[in-house]
Amino acid sequence: MRSKAAVMGHPIHPMLIPFPIVGYTGALVGYAIYAGTDDQFWLNFAIVMNIVGVGGAVLAALPGLVDLMAAVPKGSPAKRVGTTHAMLNILTLALFAITLGVYASHWDGPARSASLGITLAAIGVASMLAAGGLGWSLVQDHQVGIRTAREQGGAEWQASAAAARHHRR
């Protein structure tokens, strides 16, 4: 199932997902270090990483939604996996958006506690990891967003692959 949101044949969604992954993980680390040190730098770091995560997630969601709606057939197992993947990512986005709303106003001054940030970010990272596993399944098991051998040259590609296997023996 070839991606409908692509640049030069390459799906956009997987190009963008590193931004929320890094942002969300960095936010969790920042909140945890802030909790242990009370160093304002780490709270500000967590806020910036939270912004990167939330912004990156919104950007990654757009081509992901296009692919889910336009490339994945209705009623297919891939549609169910894709929908669950999207719901977990929406949960993750909501958790980090709430966290950002709570802590953004503490940029110039200390937050009373980082406990809420750590808790919401930890649940968010766990949700993100579950969503990532489903995303991997969409590519690996359901071949969403990839070109098949036929689309890459069909018989020519298969003959070339067979020749390469024969050559290695």
Image (tube, helix red, strand yellow):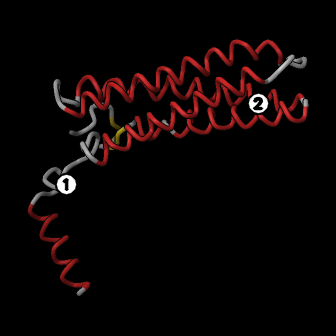
Distance from disc 1 to disc 2, alpha carbons, whole Å, reads 46 Å
Residue drawn at the location 50% of the way across and 22% of the way down: 58
SS class, disc 1:
loop
Residue drawn at the location 35% of the way across and 26% of the way down: 84
Which amino acid type is shown beneath numbered disc 2? Tyr
Check the picture and name the quadrant holding the C terminus. Answer: bottom left
Residue drawn at the location 26% of the way across and 22% of the way down: 69
Q: Residues within 10 Å of mark 2 (few under 14, many from 20)?
A: many
SS class, disc 2:
helix
Residue that carries the numbered disc 2 in the rendered image? 31
Decide if residue 118 is on the left or right side of residue 169.
right
Nearer to me, 61 or 77: 77
Residue that carries the numbered disc 1 in the rendered image? 152
Instruction: Place residue 46 in its image quadrant.
Output: top right
Which amino acid type is shown beneath numbered disc 1? Gln
Nearer to me, 65 or 90: 90
